[in-house]
Image (cartoon, rainbow, N blue to C red):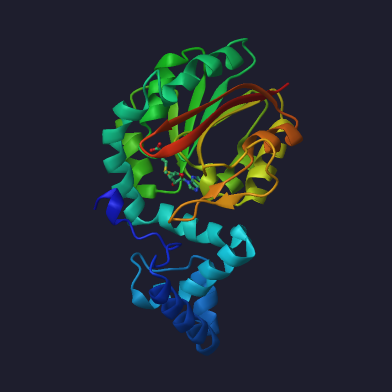
Amino acid sequence: MSIAEIHFPTMLPSDPLRRRLLVGAGRLARRVFPEQAERAARGELPGELGLWQRVLLAPTVDDAERSGDLAALAPLHRWLWSSGQAHAFHEEARERFSRWWRADRHAAIVGPLREALEAGRFSTLCEVGTGNGLVLTALAAQLPFLRRLVGLDLSEAQMARNRAEAKDPRLSFEVADAAVWLPAHAEPGWAVLTNAGVFEYFAQAQVAALFEGLAARSPSCVALIEPLAEGFDPERAVASRPYNAEKSFSHPYVAMLQSAGFRVRWRAEQRFDGVRWLLVVATAS
Ligand SMILES: C[S@@+](CC[C@H](N)C(=O)[O-])C[C@H]1O[C@@H](n2cnc3c(N)ncnc32)[C@H](O)[C@@H]1O
């Protein structure tokens, strides 16, 4: 399956009439089968989405968009990234690694990250949403002073493959929801990284709680590479905004890091492959 063929549960038809029909059918279905609709909205869905699931989900997605209550979409993003479709995505994303992880693109973060971690107070780098693990593996070679590099992801199949391929004994991979795993495991001396869009699938309150929890375990570092909607100001915006057909979120990362107690040490923006990227390295001492 190619990335273009992924069935995002958060997508609605772009044609307004088809969208109205689907949402209308969904509202009716929700009245007749309320428990099924609630389970679907919680992300309790079969491995593949059929028309019935799309009907059940349509009002949840429509309501979230209209009300701006994006937290309602987070369970649907979680379902997608735990599914077999996610494994297919990560396999295909191997091809883009060498195009995106270049010194003039996302790998521009390596120098500022090394500078932030080098002083000897950091032991561990945890990559949330590590996918195929290629970035974490590259960073293991580039940051030889780290004792441990942990990749977290929702895809069991992909983490099994990453474990089988890992050669550096400092690397490990965990199947976990970072919103649950990090508060239970992060310690002073940890840096948390996301690459190529991961926090974009977390509700704003979850990201805020993670930043606050990490700031309380200083020294800590957050390094992120996340997409942003055009015109969205990550320093002054208050609320997150959904920004594409899959309705992932632009969060006000800079404002959120600062209000959690982080100092933004380095920040850059890039535009390539049709995406506006924000790159940030921030530390709490
Ligand atoms: C767009 S992919 C990026 C994957 C990888 N960083 C890359 O560059 O190829 C988003 C990743 O975020 C992960 N993810 C989403 N929500 C998560 C959560 N709650 N906990 C851990 N990982 C999550 C997904 O499993 C997926 O691997």
At a point 47% along the width and 68% down the height, the residue shown is: 44
Residue 89 screen position, x and y as percent: 32, 47
Which residue in the rendered view is the most extreme toward the bottom? 32
Residue 274 screen position, x and y as percent: 38, 39
Q: Work out whether residue 36 or residue 231 is closer to the camera in this orientation and state it.
A: 231
Q: Is residue 233 visible?
A: yes
Residue 271 screen position, x and y as percent: 43, 32
Q: In the image, is residue 205 above or below residue 279? A: below
Tally of numbered tags = 0
At a point 61% along the width and 18% down the height, the residue shown is: 122
Residue 140 screen position, x and y as percent: 43, 20
Please tell me in which quadrant of the rendered image residue 264 appears.
Answer: top right
At a point 49% along the width and 21% down the height, the residue shown is: 109
Which residue in the rendered view is the most extreme toward the left? 1
Q: In the image, is residue 221 above or below residue 26? A: above
* Quarter the C terminus occupies: top right
Q: In the image, is residue 189 above or below residue 173? A: above
